[in-house]
Amino acid sequence: MVKITVETREKVGTIYTMTNENGVQLSAIAHGARLYECLIPVDGIKRDIVVGYESLVDHQRTRYYGATIGPIAGRIAQAHFELEGKTYHTEPNEKGNTLHGGSHSFDTKEWAATPFQTEEEAGVAFSYETVDGEGGFPGNIKVTVTYALNEENAFRITYEATSDQPTILNLTNHGYFNLTGEASQAIDEHYLMVDADYVAETQEDTTTTGEKIDVTKTVFDFTNEKQIGETFLDTPFILNHALEEDLRLVSPDRKVTLAVKTTEPGIVLYTTGAGEAGEVMKTGTLVHHGSIAIEAQGIPGTEKYPQFGSFIVNAATPYHAETVYHLTF
């Protein structure tokens, strides 16, 4: 049976850890409803595949590592959107656009935590409530993000939300991974498969245009598993949902596989670069191209481009999304 423990660590505070009988340990913290670590036993050694800081102070400084992102993951172009004939203005916190909900968004909040344990899994549910107009977004929004681990070495992140008036939501987890367990090793030799024939076209500021690009004969073609190489990604992949897994990441030694399946229409992949290199992580000093963020979500820009779907949540249409991460080792 999977167990949940609650402990206090000096540098990060209260931490919630799920442990199954196979030795997988998944930990999360309430600040930002954040994925903190994932330890798996490989050749008798625990390998932490989640890249992030040891201390809460550093997480607060850089914000996004492992955090729940919302109300809107990605960028809102020109920091405004229209909903039911009304224009709402959000904070232009990056190049005139709104990045990841603004500077006081979900990743900065202390979420209420409720640990739980059943016969099938153990986990923790984090909850947070917004106030109408918070960050420029309408509605009093109640959000729950649940982390749970089972005995099949799979963990899920489930997102649920309601709003008392029409609003928009696009939530994701901003977890960074390096399956070697060492941030000091580049991810170039990791193998990647993404079941996506198209990516959303982006502009220089990374906002989407509403168009999509066929990945054939481009650097974005990971329909067949291949090594990442030196490819830099900050890219929304439009998923086919045609396979048992939407994404598969394999360590260079092929001893660890992370398979991802999501209800969401897309996955944004981001590879860290020169801007992040040199940061001291709990698994070593981060090198250039030292981790990859796997962000399952709606296609950024959907609030402006209905061809990508809808971000609208209201009293009759609650928000629900789930991403499952299956580990093989």
Image: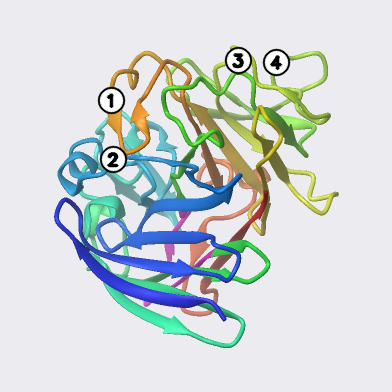
Residue drawn at (57%, 64%), measured in percent from left and top?
156
Tag 2 secondary structure: loop
In magenta stretch: residue 266:
no
Which of the marked residues, 4 or 1, is nearer the chain's N terminus?
4
Horizontal side, residue 246 vs residue 56: left or right: right
Instruction: Tell me the mark number nearer the camera, choosing from 2 and 4.
Output: 2
> Where residue 204 appears, x then y in whole percent?
47, 15
What residue did someone put label 2 on? Answer: 53
What residue did someone put label 4 on? Answer: 219
> Where residue 33 appears, x then y in whole percent?
34, 60
Which of the marked residues, 3 or 2, is nearer the chain's N terminus?
2
Whether 159 is drawn above or below 94: the answer is below
Q: Using a 10 Å C-alpha cutoff, classify the residue at mark 2 as few (fewer than 14 neighbours), some (14 to 19) or many (20 or more).
A: many
What segment is highlighted magenta in the picture? Answer: 157-172
Q: Using a 10 Å C-alpha cutoff, classify the residue at mark 1 as few (fewer than 14 neighbours), some (14 to 19) or many (20 or more).
A: some
Instruction: Tell me the mark number nearer the camera, choosing from 3 and 4.
Output: 3
Kind of residue sitting beneath label 1: Glu
Kind of residue sitting beneath label 2: Tyr
Q: Which mark is residue 19?
A: none
Marks 2 and 1 close (CB-CB < 8 Å): yes
Tag 1 secondary structure: loop
Which of the marked residues, 3 or 4, is nearer the chain's N terminus?
4
Horizontal side, residue 38 vs residue 244: left or right: left
Relative depth, front residue between 178 and 254: 254
Marks 3 and 4 close (CB-CB < 8 Å): yes
